[in-house]
Amino acid sequence: MADWTKKTILRNEALQKYIYETSAYPKEHEQLKELREATLMNAKKTLEIGVFTGYSLLTTALTLPPDGKVIAIDPDKEAYEVGAPFIKKAGMQHKIEFFPSDAFFVLDDLIKNGEEGSFDFVFVDAYKSDYLKFHELTLKLVKVGGIVAYDNTLWYGSVAQSEKEVVEDLIKRYRNFVVEFNSFIAADPRVESVMNVPVDEAQFLSMLLKIMNAKKTMEIGVFTGYSLLATALALPDDGQITAIDLDIEAYETGLPFIQKAGVEHKINFIQSDAFVVLNDLINGEEKSSFDFIFVDAQKEDYMKFHEKVMELVKTGGIIAYDNTLWLGSVAYKQDEYEKHSEMPESVWRNRDYVIQFNSFLASNPQIESSLLSIGDGLTLCRRLY
């Protein structure tokens, strides 16, 4: 079954990990790494189910702002007390409320006490046989847009093996629970992946910009700014990026990392509807002035975006469109919906827009294009005239 939670067409976990660890992560700028992690951890109110000695708990507490809060649950108080002195030494104990209890009791109480939809981040590292039950309860507690992280979902690699190939008793005992849970999550329409560009895609774009000697670029759809920071790092010191997104809160998550990397001066962030800005640029004599434009916004608007950005990119310049394989769904036929019932409705709903757009680009005489099987599909368009 396809894993629809990942923003990449690569479904092999081990292969994806290999690519990231051998090619992408070693050369990832320190601030890009921190921003990638902070996108998941930009939180104030969090929950941890399964604490042990508190290593991940301390990591979370250190990441949170001074007024952040972690509710930590584990029936093993003795193990927690092993790590408690280190938490205290780090000055983080005021952020942590520890419950030595069965997690289901605490979760039920939180729901009864009106805590539904109030948590930014939930981390689960408990009995794998209970992951499905935990999922139902934590989805009630985490806010819309929040993140639930489940540990050990590859279960020592056993999920990629047949049941007969697994020998060790402990691994064998819980393997099927993890396999079932992964399949359930992949088909759960209530959850989706984070929205940043994959690391290898950002690395590719960075290299492309350097090869092009690009100086003036645009990004439509910013989120927390991972690809934006990658672009800014690739541009020369006098380079310029016009970045457009309605969601300034997400951008402000990444801003400290952009500032720390010393590239904020290259970025002009505009909180606005993109079409308003594009029209202003066209009317303001910015036609044919951009070297590179990156588009990662609403798929139903890609055709309209193309019409506008073609006026703004210079002849020979590049426009890059993200998600043009749309989690692989573009390869399915319209009447195959029932066959791929595990596909979230949100994926199927936008599939036709992406298919139409890909066909349009393929037959457009104004550009030469190449659809790359990187990330979730990246189409590069070079303006010919």
Image (spheres, rainbow, N blue to C red):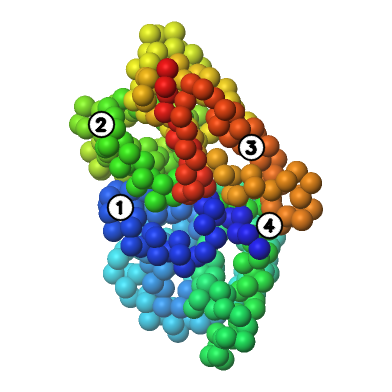
The residue to which callout 2 is attached is 213
Q: Which sits earlier in the primary sequence, circle 2 or circle 3? A: 2
* Circle nearer the viewer, 2 or 1: 2
**Quarter of the N terminus within the rendering:** bottom right
Marks 1 and 3: in contact by CB < 8 Å? no
| Amino acid of disc 4 | Asp
**Residue at position x 50%, y 65% from top?**
13
Q: Could you tell me if residue 111 is visible in this image? A: no
Label 4 packing within 10 angstroms: few (<14), some (14-19), many (20+): some
Q: Callout 1, which amino acid?
A: Glu
Mark 2–mark 1 distance (CA, rounded to whole Å): 20 Å
Q: Label 2, label 3: how many angstroms apart (C-alpha)?
A: 32 Å
Task: Write down the residue under mark 4.
Answer: 188
Position above or below: 252 against 366: below
Q: Amino acid at mark 2?
A: Asn
Label 3 or label 1, whichever comes before in sequence order: 1
